[in-house]
Every structure is written in structure tokens, then in C-alpha cells.
Amino acid sequence: MTDLILHHYPASPFAEKTRLLLGFKGLSWRSVLIPRMLPKPDLIPLTGGYRKTPVLQIGADIYCDTALIARRLEAQKSSPALFPPGQELVTASFSTWVDSVVFPHSVALVFQPESIAVRFAGMPAEAVKAFIADRAALFSGGSATRLSAEQARHQWPTIMGRLNQQLAHEPGDFLFGAPSVADFSLFHCLWFLKATPVTAPLVDAYPHVQAWYNRVLGFGHGASSEMSPEEALNVARDNTPAALPEEIFAEPNGFKPGDQVLLAATDYGVDPVAGELLFAGREELVIKRTDARVGTVHVHFPRFGFRLEKA
Ligand SMILES: N[C@@H](CCC(=O)N[C@@H](CS)C(=O)NCC(=O)O)C(=O)O
């Protein structure tokens, strides 16, 4: 069973990035809907505590964080490339910049009171309160500090002005010539803003960005079919994890295969995942863990932006 199973929810920007990556690659996938806040009782048995959205499952292998999911999809189908040859550094680094700089601007703008009022209109006050408390917990304990709406509004014209300027040059179809992971990383931050009439003008005011936005949107989501959370857990239980990457185990801080470790994101959503370290490469870390509902799974994380410590 080698289905690509995406655990996600419709309104998640990082999930939208991944749905478009799947569309760009022309891949078929299974869709498992997860709650947009804790508790996530059918996701945590797979990840061991990682709670962010989305998560990609392939049999008994679980991929956390879209930076690594993009690389896994590239391994699944190399063409069209997400990391075009000769642009590996610039496209990946641009994506890191987007995640740490542009996305926090989008969050601050979407969660400003005027936008929240529209976005959450019709939702019971208690549910809004619970969601806001969940996101406050998500952002506690990590290196990410939440940008104020005022500062985000203040800096937004610089970000968008530069993008519009770059995309104005011919051919200007995509950020770095051919489409790449950079386009998808940026896209979802703007998609988030466009979902609410209060924030949509922050994108619509920039014509070259708008034209590029429609091109990226045009890749679509590929072919998907629903899968129940229970079925996804059974897929993990009924499969054995794939062979580890062939790259040599290389861990600069002296961790060895077999060490019991804790792995956690450093920015936000820093809930640690405990397991046995199996593999440490330049881009990827893999730990083994077992859970009563899924048996043994391998959980894969990016190296960059994650912290490894002894359990
Ligand atoms: N670095 C992560 C960021 C993922 C992220 O922040 N996802 C948001 C949703 S777009 C999230 O997890 N929100 C809390 C949740 O879904 O529980 C990635 O690239 O996957």
C-alpha cells in the first residue's frame, strides 16, 4: 500500500501548499480530514505528538513539515521539479524566508480584529475563544514571536512591492523562472489573506502578483479521494516502514543510531516527539516509535528548524 495520504483540513494554508504540490506533480492522493485544533486523537498516534498541519503518510512512514513533504514528493516523482537543478539553494532558502517572515505577516493580518470578525462570523463565541486559546498555546515555548498587526501592516507594502517588482520582469511567470517550491511556499501565505474580504485587497492591489497567483492556483490539487482516519491508522498498522535513505548517517552533535531522542520544532508547535533515532542526514531525521493503534512507524522530520536532544 503506497498511497500518499494527506492529513489536513481545508482552511490550512500549509495544507493548501501541499495540495498544490500534489497537483503540480500530477499525483493522486488520499485525503484524511483532521481537526484544526487539539485534540487530534487520530493523528497523534501516527506522529507521536507533532500536531501541526499537514502531515503526509505513506504506509508506515510519516512525514512532518511541508519542507520535508516537498522533498518526499520530489523523490516520489522527480518531474516537474520542485527544486530545479542549479536552483536548489535559492528555492529552498526562499521558502525558509517565507516561512519565518512572510507567513507571520499573513497570520498577524488575518488575525487582526476586523478580519477575525468576518472570518469567524457565525461561529459560536465559545468556539472562537477555544480556537484563539489553541493558537496561543501553539505559539508558546518556541522561538517564533507573534508579529503585531500594526507592524505587519507597516511592513507588508515592502514585501509585496518587491514581489510585484520582480514578477513584472519578462517572462515573470514564476519567481525563479520555472515553477519551483518557492512559488508554492509563497502562494499559501497570500491564499490565506485572500480568503477574507478584509485582507484580500492586500494581495489584489499588486497586479503582477495577482497574475502569478492565478498561475499557481491553476496547478490545482491533483486527484484525491477521501479516507477515514481509522482507515489511515490501519494502513500504518498493516505496513512496515520503508528502507531508510541511503545517505550516510551524519550527526554533528554526536548522536548515534539507536539513541533514544526527543525531536521538536524550534519555532512554534514545539511539542516533542520521543523515539529511537534511526537516521540523520543533511535534510532529514528519522525516528522509530511504536503506538498501540499503529504498531511501529518511522516518523520523518526536516533537520533544519528542528531540535534533537537525548530523551
Ligand atoms: N513548518 C510547518 C508549519 C505548519 C503550520 O504552521 N501549520 C498550521 C496550519 S496552516 C498549523 O499547524 N496550525 C495548527 C494546527 O493545525 O493544529 C510546515 O511547513 O508544515
Image (cartoon, rainbow, N blue to C red):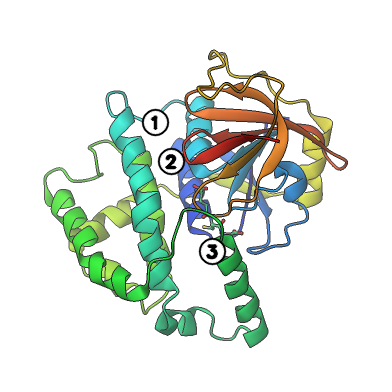
The 10 Å Cα crowd at callout 2, few under 14, some 14 to 19, many 20 or more, is many
The 10 Å Cα crowd at callout 3, few under 14, some 14 to 19, many 20 or more, is few
Relative depth, front residue between 17 and 149: 149
**Relative to 266, does residue 304 appear above or below in the rendering?**
above
Tell which circle, 3 or 1, labels the residue nearer the N-terminal end. 3
- For mark 2, what is the residue? 24
Residue 220 percent location from the top left of the image: 45, 50
Residue 241 percent location from the top left of the image: 73, 26
Mark whose residue sits in front, 3 or 2 = 3
Tag 2: amino acid: Phe
Question: Is the residue under label 1 in contact with that under label 3 (CB below 8 Å)?
Answer: no
Label 2 sits on a secondary structure element that is: helix
Q: Which quadrant: the C terminus?
A: top right
Q: Is mark 3 within 8 Å of ligand 1?
A: no
Tell which circle, 2 or 1, labels the residue nearer the N-terminal end. 2
Relative depth, front residue between 308 and 17: 308
Label 3 sits on a secondary structure element that is: loop
- For mark 3, what is the residue? 11
Question: Is the residue under label 1 in contact with that under label 2 (CB below 8 Å)?
Answer: yes
Tag 3: amino acid: Ala
Tag 1: amino acid: Pro
Label 1 sits on a secondary structure element that is: loop
Residue 131 percent location from the top left of the image: 61, 73
**Relative to 49, does residue 72 appear above or below in the rendering?**
above
* Labelled disc at residue 80: 1
Q: What's the CA distance linking mark 2 and mark 1? A: 7 Å
Residue 238 percent location from the top left of the image: 83, 32
* Labelled disc at residue 287: none
Q: What's the CA distance linking mark 3 and mark 1? A: 26 Å
Q: Is residue 60 left or right of residue 187?
A: right
Q: What's the CA distance linking mark 3 and mark 2? A: 19 Å
